Amino acid sequence: MTISFSGLVSGLDTSSWVEAFVSVKQEEVKKYETELEELQKEKTTLNDTRSVFSDLRSAIEKLTDAKFGGTFDLFAQNSVTSSNENIFTATVTSSAVRQNYDISVQQLATTTKATSKEAASAIADDETLLSNLGITEGTLTAYVNGEKHTINIDEADTLGDLKARMAEFGVKTEVDEAGVLRFSAQNGSDTINIGATTDSSNLVSLIGLTQQEDGTYASTSSLYKASVATNLTSTDSGFNQQITAGTFTIGDATFTIDENTTLSSLISQINSSEDAQAYAYWDDATGKLNITSTVEGASYINIEAGTSNFTDVMGFTTSEWDADGNLVSSKMYTDAQQLGKNAIFTVNGTTMTSTSNTVTSDISRIEGVTLTLKGTNTEEDGNTTLQVTQNTEDLESAVNAFIEAYNAAIAKVEEVTASGADLHGETSLTSLARTLKSYSTSSNTTNGGVFKLLSDIGISTAAADGNNLSTDTYQLSLDSEKFMKALQENPESVKSILTGDNGVLSMMENAVEQSLSATTGFFDVKTSTLDSNIDKMEEKITKKNTSIETYRSQLENKFYQMEMAIAQMQQNYSSFLS
């Protein structure tokens, strides 16, 4: 790099001279940069315009995709209403016939419930932890002849501990053969009262402790040893019979019990299994396992013994095993199950039944409609009505979206092709806009329908007249009332004029699609031209800047040589004088 020391010898400001000479050359670069900015701005405008027409294409396709049928056909979509959604709701597909149906529900489907025939748990005894019974730690108050006594219940306390502490001040505690917890006075002449508002243990409320006519206290629920925390195969599990490890089946699901399985974990497995088609819960108050079907209708829950005796102990089956633990025979207690009910309803007076409250068309014979039964009709209600009609809401929304996109596209063309605008003179673009305008107002006599113009179905432009000379008279608008009336009178003709082979939107779609076509469409061709021009202009600028830098270096070198020459002359002159 050359380091210039301007005018050190000559005293001339040669650096300023260099910048002045270079600036003349840079004016041409500025001209190129201005042209580049214009090209880039034109490309940005073109991309914005392309985006508007892409939106128009999408809005048109929302309607013209009717040719693909099914969910794509907005003209075929139905809506369904229930006159009383407390009785039933419904969903509908495009295959439903548009008419009204009288629906009456006499009975809802219910689920089957299986409950252990007898308590599966043994009665609580002195070794039973109070916490396993759900009794929380805290205080319990007993009054003997009015004298207050408070005992503390700890988490590790057993029923035997409770008995001992109550006995210290004359209260006898026992659990009878039915599992009922009873408190009485050890001395028959004493009066006892159990419980105070200051107690912090839940014992009284949990077991429903109630004073009897003879002055004693008894629980309203029984106390059982087994709990959800119980290890099922443990010798002290608390069940009437020790449960063996192995398998059993509920529904189509097979479950396995091993030495680590608790009642809680097993219930979780059942409730998370879809194949079980049921959910289970343990009732501490009765010492029974309850299984409820997740499938409605009058069908039994399939419960089968396997290599474990679990279902026998729970009171759902009775089985025999050989010495090797192989199941020999098993029977299910059907009387342990409260059978669900089938739904009963009528459609236009015809009585029908369903195993589920979700009634599909193969049951109701209402094609394309699924009913969800919610309640039963009373005499005051009478019949409820199901009404299937055309879904005009989505269709009208799609037409409004098209109109909005159309107006935006035409307005964009007007904006970008105006005099002085970025795309002024683009005849392909203005021709596209004229074509779309002509389609929106032209008569279509080839569609075979009763409607020939968009205005016939409520889609029209503002007419230019002496009082309205605005340039935006091309703007489309929708007369919703007229559009709905046309749909009601002749929906097929509305569909035909919009999306038929020669329909307005079909023709618009073809025109817009051609302009957006890859490689050959207006937007791609114009973009390609602009990209080429931008590349050329950037190359010109690069070359010119390189040329200017070379020019700058040459000037700086010449002035440097001049300074050196002057310096040499001065040195020679000095030598001559000396």
Image: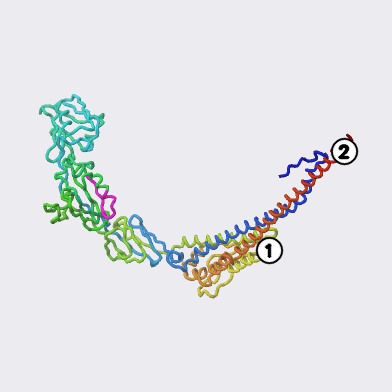
Residue 271 shown in magenta: yes
Q: Quadrant of the C terminus?
A: top right
**Farthest residue in the top direction?**
147
Sequence-first disc among 2 and 1: 1
Kind of residue at disc 2 = Tyr
Q: Tell whether label 1 touches label 2 (CB within 8 Å).
A: no
- The disc label shown at residue 233, or none: none
Name the quadrant containing residue 83: bottom left
In the rendered image, residue 455 lying in the magenta stretch gets the answer no
The residue depicted at 80 percent of the width and 45 percent of the height is 561
User: Label 2 to label 1, Cα distance in Å?
Assistant: 71 Å
Judging depth in this view, the residue of 147 and 32 nearest the camera is 32
Compared across the picture, whether 430 is left or right of 353 comes to right
**Rendered residue at 19%/46% (across/down):** 288
Residue drawn 56% across the image and 67% down it: 508
Is 156 situated above or below 94? above
**Chain part drawn in magenta:** 269-282
Residue 470 in view here = no
Query: Residue 425 — which label?
Result: 1
State left or right for residue 430 relative to residue 270.
right
The correct choice, above or below, for 90 with respect to 443 in the image is above
Residue 473 placement (x, y as % from top left): 62, 62
Q: Position of residue 547 (x, y in %)?
A: 73, 53
Dividing the picture into quadrants, the one containing residue 342 is: bottom left
Observer-side mark, 2 or 1, equals 2
Left or right of 195? Residue 7 is right
Q: Along the line of sight, which residue is nearer the eye, 430 or 569?
A: 569
**SS of the residue at dot 2?**
helix
Residue at the disc numbered 2: 573
Residue 198's spot in the image, x, y percent?
A: 26, 29
Q: Nearer the viewer, residue 430 or 196?
A: 430
What kind of element bears circle 1? loop
